[in-house]
Image (cartoon, rainbow, N blue to C red):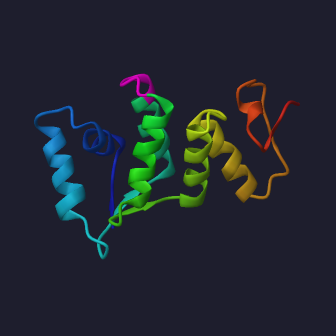
Amino acid sequence: MIGLDTNILVRFLTQDDPIQSPRATEIIERRLTEENPGFVSIVAMVETVWVLDRAYRLAANEIAAAVERMLQTDVLVVENEPEVFSAMTALKEGQGSFADAVIAALGTRAGCSCTLTFDQKALRLSGFEFP
């Protein structure tokens, strides 16, 4: 397995750099295999979504589509895949931010009865409560 940093994922998804994008595509489409997949950590996934939102100003549905594409790629192993899927669904449905949805989903997986927050937007997501 080979770990992939955020910049590899962003260059692959955006295809915006004449040198790095083709290299990222080569890695994901030709170098990685199901026997030797790329590992996408939860941190890299959250950072990727943040970059697509803040730096590229993509709409929530476009970001959700990018996450879904990564989840469906056979040569990628996504850490905490069920929680990432849940967060992608929340983002697609406009329920809250991807990062907040990941926090809530990971809390639930860890056995938390709830996750406390002062964030009014996060409170729209299941799993969060105001203290």
Quadrant where the C terminus is found in the figure: top right
**Residue at image location 21% in from the left, 32% down from the top:** 16
**Residue at image location 39% in from the left, 52% down from the top:** 69
Frontmost residue, 61 versus 20: 61
Please determine whether, in this image, residue 94 is positioned above or below residue 40.
Answer: above
Quadrant position of residue 92: top right
Quadrant where the N terminus is found in the figure: bottom left
| Residue 72 picture location, percent across and down | 41, 60
**Residue at image location 62% in from the left, 33% down from the top:** 94
- 40 with respect to 113 (left or right): left
Report whether residue 44 is seen: no
Frontmost residue, 63 versus 49: 63
| Residue 116 picture location, percent across and down | 81, 36
Please determine whether, in this image, residue 83 is positioned above or below residue 45.
Answer: below
Q: Which residues are magenta?
A: 53-58
**Residue at image location 30% in from the left, 42% down from the top:** 13
